[in-house]
Amino acid sequence: MKRTSKIICLFVGAYYSLAGALLFFAPAFFFRKIAPIGPYNRHYCVDLGSFLLPLGLFLLLAARHTPWSKPVIGLAALASTLHLLSHLQDGVHSAAALLADAFFLAVALFLIAPLVMEREVRS
């Protein structure tokens, strides 16, 4: 795995791990301070955290254990892309929503790019 790919896995893995941990262990804090969207639903927040936290942790591990990297990065890229599509379906309601959409697009592209670049180098 290239150094750039490792850095991307570490950055995105840390982001997803932190967001997932906050959603899982402190859902009310996450909702009030980070994403006050719609009515608060503790169960939904904890459910989301239960998926984001392991995804982030596995991205962190993928940076170290390269045999895991492609499937983990592929899964994270797919999840990030689906998250972006869910934002786009809701429409852009604010500058913050537009920034969130741009962020998830960047995450998806940064996760997919190393897979494509490494494949082209080997070809």
Image (cartoon, rainbow, N blue to C red):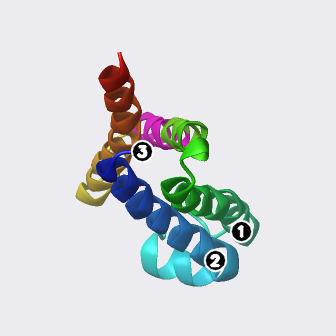
Q: Position of residue 19 (x, y in %)?
A: 52, 69
Mark with earlier residue (1, 2): 2
Mark with earlier residue (3, 2): 3
Q: How far apart are marks 1 and 2 (CA)?
A: 6 Å
Q: Quadrant of the C terminus?
A: top left
Q: Position of residue 39 (x, y in %)?
A: 60, 66
The residue stretch that appears in magenta: 79-90
- The residue that label 2 is drawn on is 27
Q: What element carries label 1?
A: helix
- The residue that label 3 is drawn on is 1
User: In the rendered structure, which amino acid carries the disc numbered 2?
Assistant: Pro
41 relative position to 56: left or right: right
Question: Quarter of the image holding residue 51?
Answer: bottom right
Work out whether 33 lies above or below 80: below
- The residue that label 1 is drawn on is 46
User: In the rendered structure, which amino acid carries the disc numbered 3?
Assistant: Met
- Observer able to see residue 56: yes
Mark with earlier residue (3, 1): 3
Work out whether 63 lies above or below 78: below
User: In the rendered structure, which amino acid carries the disc numbered 1?
Assistant: Val
Work out whether 122 lies above or below 23: above
Q: Would you say the magenta stretch is mainly helix, strand or loop?
A: helix
Q: Do the residues labelled 1 and 2 touch (CB within 8 Å)?
A: yes
Closer to the camera, 60 or 64? 64
